[in-house]
Amino acid sequence: MPIPVAEIISDAFILLGLTVMTIGVIGIFRMPDVYTKLHAASKAVFLGVCSLLVAVSFSGNPEIIARSVLIGILLVFTTPVAAHEIARAAAREQLARIENHGQPPVA
């Protein structure tokens, strides 16, 4: 029995979304300060979740597609604002940035 093309594309977007989110989680643990952790987290949330929303949209159900579009629009507007506010709060608390000047991190 042949697998429909929509399922293959949907599976590819699911794999992409999970990979991006996994890399984001690794970035959160590996990055040295709040600003770089924030960068990894915001990119992972936006790109990973949007990939999953595209995968869900291949179901063909109009209600699910509409919800996916609304969630995507919500993410487009809230992710940068949330990242900005977290960075502002970190700056207000005067959290230090880690400067390594191209040196590899100490293990």
Image (cartoon, rainbow, N blue to C red):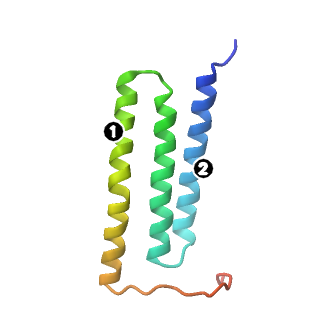
In the picture of the structure, the residue carrying the numbered disc 1 is: 70
Residue at 63% x, 19% y is: 4
Give the quadrant of the C terminus.
Answer: bottom right
Residue position marked by numbered label 2 in the rendering: 19
Near mark 2 (Cα within 10 A), the count class, few <14, some 14-19 or many ≥20, is some
Element at label 2: helix
Residue 78 appears at what percent x and percent y?
A: 32, 55
Which residue lies most toward the top here? 1
Q: Is residue 98 above or below residue 39?
A: below
First in sequence: mark 2 vs mark 1 = 2
Q: Amino acid at mark 2?
A: Thr
Using residue 95 as the reference point, say whether residue 92 is left or right of it: left
Q: Residues within 10 Å of mark 1 (few under 14, many from 20)?
A: few
Compared with 38, 92 (above or below) is below
Q: Position of residue 102 (x, y in %)?
A: 66, 84
Q: Which mark is residue 6?
A: none
Report the amino acid beneath label 1. Leu
